[in-house]
Amino acid sequence: MAVKLRLARLGCRNRPFYRVMAADSRSPRDRKHIEVLGYYNPLPGQDGGKRMGLNFERVKYWLSVGAQPSDPVQRLLFRAGVLPPPPMVAMGRKGGPRDIRPVDPLTGRVMMAEQPTKTTNGLMDV
């Protein structure tokens, strides 16, 4: 049984509310789950921020036994500081070749690698 950490949508139309769940990968999105691990409310509250609550101990347990987070849950866990940043690459123009330079996940800018410098004897210094 492959376990995934994913979001289940609740709430009414135009007012989404999500629960972070550990579920069997074959079960439907909003149906049977193994455990509720937290919640995520993407709508801004009165203070202007999005609300999120996670049970970190249980999330770490499920990750340690091999549960795979979905892409949205992986981004939430990165923001909460549980996971390292997901690998991102810069996109060239649409339909063109992919740019393989790494992108900083917090700013979205391309991270510049250090360029090798030439020394006085003409050899490359790394």
Image (cartoon, rainbow, N blue to C red):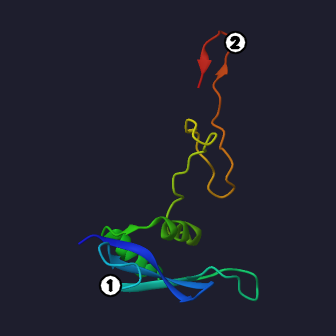
Of the pair 56 and 13, the residue shown nearer to us: 13
The circle on residue 71 is none
Q: Please rate how many residues cluster around mark 1, counting C-alpha atoms within 10 Å: few if below 14, some from 14 to 19, many from 20.
A: few
The circle on residue 120 is 2
Q: Residue under circle 1?
A: 34
State whether residue 78 is above or below residue 100. Answer: below
| Residue occupying the point 63% across, 36% down | 113
SS for callout 2: loop
Q: Quadrant of residue 126?
A: top right
> Is 111 situated left or right of 56 in this image?
right
Of the pair 116 and 45, the residue shown nearer to us: 45
**Residue 85: percent from left, percent from top:** 54, 58
> Is 13 situated left or right of 67 in this image?
right
Mark 1 or mark 2, earlier in chain:
1
**Residue 47: percent from left, percent from top:** 76, 86
**Residue 72: percent from left, percent from top:** 51, 68
SS for callout 1: loop
**Residue 30: percent from left, percent from top:** 41, 83
